[in-house]
Image (tube, rainbow, N blue to C red):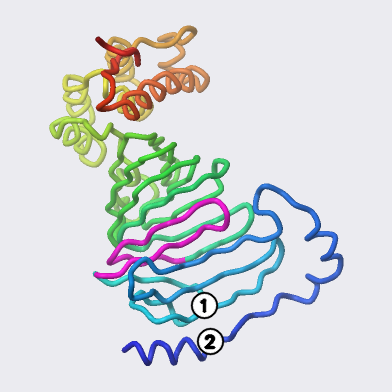
Amino acid sequence: MNERELQDAVKGLPKSIEPPRDLWPGIQDRIGRRSWRGGRRWYWVVVPLAAAAALVAVLVGRSGPVAWDVAPLAGRPLLGTKPLVWLQTDDSSRALIAVGRIGQVEVRPGTRVQLVAARADDHRLALARGTIDAKVDAIPRLFFVETPAGTAIDLGCAYTLQTDSLGNGLLHVTGGEVEFQTGERSARVPLGAKVQIRPAPGGGGGGGGGPGIPYVEDAPEPFVHALARLDFENGEARSTRTVLALAQARDAISLWHLLQRVDPSLRGAVYDRLAALVPPPAGVTRAAALVLDQPALDSYWQKIHRILFRRTILRGVRRISPRTGLTQP
């Protein structure tokens, strides 16, 4: 489809779709109430980044049923034949999606995304393939990005997420924290960390698919490869021993996840290596960690997270001990 045909197709779309009539009774009282979660309006906006403007789709609504408006502009990114079904960039175009009042998503070249939901309590994209850069400033679990292999759940963050059409991908968090979940398997990925993502064999929600074990962005390649073998290949005991032998204090985030994924018979070895590299905070015992006591795990996570945060934001400014989080001479 050439540019003129695309413009003609867009002109044929309805200007708006009227909401149900039962929206109007009592609407004055409803729109008079304000809340931080979106005020009286929320909206998605896809806007151009390149000089040759992108096709723009605008979704405007209220906290109840919504009306959808489409504003046509010339450009290369393609909008699906129905309003806001999908947005696709070619190899030389980009787009920017404004996520209501909570953030924005840059859509890189060669990417296909779908706008799934835009409600005050649920902003949701589906990334079919390609790469996006998201930046969100909101309470946790308000913005979601679905991929073929699972869902990225915003915990107040900035991140880059890439995937192919099968679900092989990578999540790199550059601010805050993201949870990636596939079925019952999940990974917490904070600032300065990455996680590899794989589709489950047969398309299920487990069995070696989903998020791997997160690792810090400066982890050496041998350690990253050892994690990948442990995550997505057979040989748990052997791969676990390799990971433990290679692990350093900077890798505490990986061992914290590993503790919860290995067979119970291997937990003791994982905990002992973690505790030797980054001592547990006060109140966290070996016995509690081995039974995966959630308060104990959460307390340990907070310490590991705090150390990684200081290491990341002060990199190149101060030397921070990966064991304690304190400044080194």
Q: Quarter of the image containing the N terminus?
A: bottom left
Residue 116: give its label. Answer: none
Q: Position of residue 67 (x, y in %)?
A: 65, 74
Residue 13: image tag: 2
Residue depicted at x 42% and y 18% = 303
Left or right: residue 124 versus residue 290 is: right
Residue plotted at (40% across, 69% down): 48
Q: In this rendering, is residue 306 above or below 176?
A: above
Query: Depth check: 55 or 251 in front?
Result: 55
| One can see residue 234 in this view | yes
Quadrant of residue 237 within the rendered picture: top left
Per the image, is 109 magenta? yes
Picture coordinates of residue 212 (x, y %)? 30, 39
Q: In which quadrant of the rendered view does residue 286 lie?
A: top left
Residue identified by numbered label 1: 83
Q: Residues within 10 Å of mark 1 (few under 14, many from 20)?
A: many
Circle 2 residues within 10 Å: few <14, some 14–19, many ≥20: some
Task: Please give the range of residues in magenta.
Answer: 92-114
- Residue 161 shown left or right of residue 46 in the figure: left
Q: Are marks 1 and 2 in contact (CB under 8 Å)?
A: yes
Question: Which amino acid type is shown beneath numbered disc 1?
Answer: Pro
Q: Which residue is rendered at x = 27% and y = 14% of the image?
A: 273
Pick out the residue farthest to the left.
222
Q: Position of residue 101 (x, y in %)?
A: 57, 54
For the C terminus, the image quarter is top left
Quadrant for residue 247, please give it.
Answer: top left
Task: Decide whether residue 259 is among the magenta residues.
Answer: no
Q: Give the number of callouts.
A: 2
